[in-house]
Amino acid sequence: MAAAPDQADATIAPLVLALDDDPDIRALLETFLPDYELRVRAVGTGTAMLEILHSEPVDVLLLDLRLPGEDGMSIARQVRERSMVPIIIVSGRRDEADRVMGLELAADDYVTKPFSPRELVARIRAVIRRAQQQVVTAHDEALRAYRFSGWELNLRTRRLTNPAGQCVELTNGEFNLLCAFLSAPEAVLTRDQLLERSRLHNLEVYDRAIDVTILRLRRKLERDASNPRLIVTERGAGYRFAVPVSILR
């Protein structure tokens, strides 16, 4: 029996928006990704990318850093200021400093060229899954928010407010890592435990990704990021969220 029209259209494939000045890369993405149930829009300029991002619900952004006459890092910052869409940087830059900078500034993952199309698909799917998941203790859907030291993290809206009631923007990676800490307050968590709990980059960058994301969180949460009181380092062991946390249901 054929599905009703509304049932057949109920599941829409995720939309991947790709910005790359190389027409061969754009053609590859437009040909390959639909075979894996991913829709794709591939463009060659930041202006075209922003127009689509503002007009269509994009699930993940693939961003090349090296663009003629444009700064890929600046574009990533602009996107992150306006949207929580997951960003995967796809670049020929292989230096660790470039990778760390990309993750620290805005990105949810980083892929170097030349890349395996199948690996790229796996990374896209992983980033989309992380964006769709809310990290909640034991997946308790009744858990609404965490409170600590005057801060509140609402798990349903993904909104973090400071003691003055102001909203502080979080990337997907920052949100997931903060949830990992808040679900185990005052416990020492190793990098491996944080990677597992937060679902941060599970293919390549890994221990360094934790350090970078913690640095970003400290800059947003701490009065003095160089002398943290919330997220503290336990040398040789890992990290610990050092203040009590209350749960709202």
Image (tube, rainbow, N blue to C red):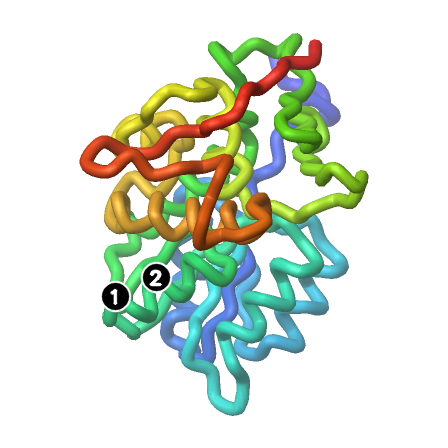
The residue at the point 71 percent across, 54 percent down is 56
Task: Write down the residue under mark 1.
Answer: 96
Q: Is residue 214 above or below residue 111?
A: above
Return the residue found at the far left.
236
Question: What is the number of the mark on residue 100?
Answer: 2
Q: Is residue 144 above or below residue 192?
A: above
Give the crowd class for mark 1: few <14, some 14-19, many >=20 residues within 10 Å: few
In whole angstroms, how far apart are the C-alphas of marks 1 and 2? 6 Å
The residue at the point 44 percent across, 18 percent down is 184
Label 1–label 2 contact, CB within 8 A? yes
Q: Nearer the viewer, residue 123 or 200?
A: 200
The quadrant in which the C terminus is found is top right
The residue at the point 51 percent across, 59 percent down is 106
User: Can residue 8 be spotted in the picture?
Assistant: no
Return the residue found at the far right.
165
Q: Secondary structure at mark 1?
A: helix
